[in-house]
Image (cartoon, grey):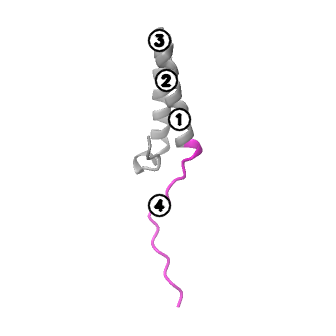
């Protein structure tokens, strides 16, 4: 998740899926009685929200270069 501007993460559904998987993983860990790993997974989810929704700036789609005025 270091490169949050990678083209793989451009679709919104992929960023939501990563956060959802971390939250589900955390719920499973808490339900199975391992709160340490639940907190770790919650940390991953929080970091993913920060990277994918707060800091994320969508890259400009391939725009043709502006033609110089003569």
The disc placed on residue 61 is 4
69 falls in the magenta region = yes
Image x and y of residue 66, in percent: 50, 77
Q: Relative to 39, does residue 63 appear above or below in the rendering? A: below
Label disc, if present, on residue 40 of the rendered structure: 2
Between disc 1 and disc 4, the foreground one is: 1
Looking at marks 1 and 4 on the same chain, the residue that comes earlier in the sequence is marked by 1
Q: CA distance from mark 2 to mark 4?
A: 35 Å
Q: Which mark is residue 47?
A: 1
Whichever of labels 3 and 1 marks the residue nearer the N terminus, that label is 3
Secondary-structure class at tag 1: helix
**SS for callout 3:** loop
Secondary element at image label 2: helix
Numbered label attached to residue 34: 3
- Segment colored magenta: 53-70
Dot 4: what SS?
Answer: loop
């Amino acid at each position: 998740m270091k490169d949050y501007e990678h083209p793989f993460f451009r679709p919104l559904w992929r960023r939501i899926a990563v956060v959802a998987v971390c939250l589900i993983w955390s719920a499973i860990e808490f339900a199975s009685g391992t709160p340490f790993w639940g907190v770790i997974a919650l940390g991953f989810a929080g970091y993913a929200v920060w990277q994918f929704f707060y800091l994320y700036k969508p890259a400009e789609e391939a725009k043709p270069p502006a033609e110089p005025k003569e």
